Image (tube, rainbow, N blue to C red):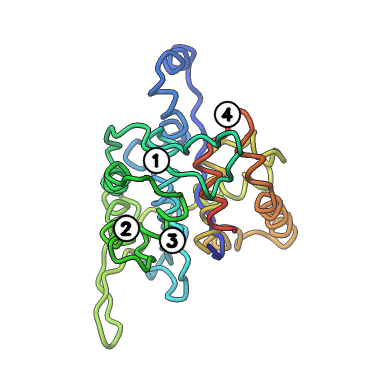
Amino acid sequence: MNRNGGDGLVRRVKARDDASANSSANSPEDENNKDTEDYTDDGDSKETRLTLMEEVLLLGLKDKEGYTSFWNDCISSGLRGCILIELGLRGRVTLEKAGMRRRGLCSRKLILKSDSPTGDVLLDEALKHIKETDPPETVQSWIEYLSGETWNPLKLRYQLKNVRERLAKNLVEKGVLTTEKQNFLLFDMTTHPLSDNVVKCRLVKMIQDSVISKWVNDAQRMEKRVLALIFLAHASDVLENAFAPLNDDDYEVAMKRVRELLDLDFETEAAKTNANEVLWAVFMAFTK
């Protein structure tokens, strides 16, 4: 899949007391969910916790106009990649075993791990499709199916429709965006201008910090959501929006470090201890 990359929002992990940490350690389901549940910034309320999809869309939206660039043809598939990684981080899907021949990430199938609802309509819709598909499909195939970018008419039923509009409505409900109608000469369009600048500013700062002041120079030491957001925002062609406010020196440093991440051997990274293979398989799908 030959696509440009995109960038996403990164959220700080809240400090947890010893009691909650011990509680998490005792529950496999909590362990699966910890990457997803504890990623809000200090002071961030539950209502404004954003999914990877919402974060990437927010980066791509023009603040005042309330819509994504008409020239961006990458964000659609990028958002589907976000969905698969969300399901992977929440312990709902995994990759089949590599086997004795150590099959590559691109050839291994995406397997249902748990069909318990996530509470997010888009994630649950994708999860339902994955559950009902036999035999299983690869990550790259699922990105194409969920995007509707397939020549197989039998697979078109897997397409997730109106994803951007549905995500924008979620952000409206969370108080991040508002809804307006704009006239474009030949047609009217519903737009979603920014209403809460604090959330987006925090998102942008988190992305900047992750590759500048908080850079760890080791993908395995980076929090998985942070890593995923950088790759997916790049795959969605919106990472530039987070780096544009930087001065020239910081911009060069940020882009250099993003390139270092993109140049990693994804197969090697996926084979390391505690790596999330779904995450690396999605990265591979967007860079092969």
Q: Residue at x 39, y 66 (%)?
A: 149
Q: Residues within 10 Å of mark 2 (few under 14, many from 20)?
A: many
Mark 3 lies on a secondary structure that is helix
**On the image, numbered disc 4 is attached to which residue?**
274
**Are dots 4 and 3 in contact, CB under 8 Å?**
no
Q: Sequence-wise, which precedes: disc 3 or disc 1?
A: 3
Instruction: Name the image quarter holding residue 241.
Output: bottom right
Q: Amino acid at mark 1?
A: Leu
Q: Amino acid at mark 2?
A: Ala
Q: Residue at x 51, y 34 (%)?
A: 97
Q: How far is the residue under mark 1 from the one under mark 4?
A: 17 Å
Q: Measuring from the top left, give residue 279's x and y in whole percent.
A: 52, 43
Of the 4 image quadrants, the one containing the C terminus is bottom right
Q: Residues within 10 Å of mark 4 (few under 14, many from 20)?
A: few
Numbered label attached to residue 87: 1
**On the image, numbered disc 3 is attached to which residue?**
77
When the figure is inspected, residue 281 is found, relative to residue 188, above or below; the finding is above
Mark 1 lies on a secondary structure that is helix
Q: How far is the residue under mark 4 from the one under mark 2?
A: 33 Å
Q: Is residue 151 left or right of residue 5?
A: left
Q: Residues within 10 Å of mark 3 (few under 14, many from 20)?
A: many
Q: Sequence-wise, which precedes: disc 1 or disc 4?
A: 1
Q: Nearer the viewer, mark 2 or mark 1?
A: 1
**On the image, numbered disc 2 is attached to which residue?**
168
Q: How far is the residue under mark 4 from the one under mark 3?
A: 27 Å
Question: Observer-nearest residue: 272 or 217?
Answer: 272
